Amino acid sequence: MSDNVFISYSSKDAKIVKKIIQKLTDEGIAYWKAPEMIPAGSNYAREIPRAIESCKVFVLMISESSQESIWVEKEIDCAINARKTIVPLNLTGVPMCEMFRFYLNNVQTIDYSQDERYAMQQFIERLKALAGREEVADASNEAAQTGLQEERQKAYSNSLSAAVNRMELPKGRRLSSGKTETVFAPVSADRNNALNLNQIPVNCEYCGGQLKQIARGIYACVDCGEEAYDSYQKVRNYLNSEGPRSVTQIMRATGVPRATIEYFLKDERLEIPMGDSARIICSGCGALIRTGVLCEKCKAKGTKKQEKIKLGDDKYRFLKRD
């Protein structure tokens, strides 16, 4: 099941929302939720409308806090304009305010506050039913793709499990701090993009247990429930928390190597903020750009050749000057 559920909630309800999302993950229902799924260097105003536009079901977590949140109100308005199916889940049993009643007129609300187990059963069944209708259309579209595209997609989705099955990975050593050394899954050498350097953890640093992927770049231990992150998610979490930082600062805080961070920038997974004077030189025409290796004009021309740019410390600045 693709990332078809957008979660709209107040950050003040994060604890109960996390509990509900864990149940969705256990049922194989993928989701999109801010802030952890907003790319580093981007912002809420850009990514949230995109996520709502591409989702299949819009889940609204109702509480006292969400009814007072300006962001939740904007997200509902965006979902209605995009004609998305809204599934409201009332977390606390609070009566809906006039604005919510206006938006959710004739929409059946599930009350989570009275009987959590029954409410989750209803909630999951409704999500699966709604997503199922959409996936019939998706399946017909996927059938029209070429065999090569299907093989690539299958190889990508199974890369982690295949690597683990093929190799006997070393067990993480017990560190003096009491944690377990993290072991990373091997990545195919022919993937010459940012993912080639993106390390994926396979064991829990707290108990050494096996990790299960619960979202893009996010993994949870099947034994103790602690979360772990791949290299890109570590960088994104750090920038979301601390704001623009230099490569050196990112390296020290996350342990992610400089080469990996530079690849994320060249792969357009990270970008230099608008207000920063630092820029990258387009390898096609020499124009100044904030991410990638080609400017928009060169991309539009269909330029195939992308020269490898050596980004020396004397020229390259990332997000904020070292």
Image (spheres, rainbow, N blue to C red):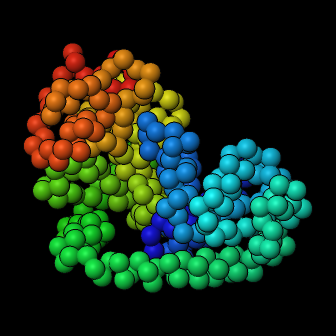
Residue 136's quadrant in the figure? bottom left
Q: Nearer the viewer, residue 242 or 59?
A: 59
Q: Residue at x 55, y 51 (%)?
A: 49
Position above or below: 88 against 291: below
Q: Is residue 14 something that shows in the picture?
A: no
* Residue at point 46%, 39% (across, down): 42
Comparing 87 with 144, the one in front is: 144
Between residue 75 and residue 195, name the one nearer to us.
75
Find residue 319 and report its image quarter.
top left
Q: Toward which corner of the image does residue 126 lie, by quadrant?
A: bottom right
Residue 255 lies left or right of residue 112; in this view the side is left
Query: Horizontal and vertical percent for residue 191?
Result: 17, 55
Vertical order, 135 against 232 (above or below): below
Q: Where does the image place residue 110, in percent across and percent down from the top left?
A: 77, 73
Q: Is residue 310 visible?
A: yes
Q: Quadrant of the N terminus?
A: bottom left
> Is residue 122 shown left or right of residue 106?
left
Residue at 44% over, 70% down = 2
Q: Is residue 107 left or right of residue 192?
A: right
Locate residue 130, reporting x and y percent.
58, 79
Q: How many marks?
A: 0
Q: Quadrant of the C terminus?
A: top left
Using the image as rendered, state which of residue 56 and residue 36 is in the foreground.
56
Indicate the position of residue 255 as horizontal and vertical percent values: 35, 36
At horizontal 29% and vertical 50% (from top left) the residue drawn is: 199
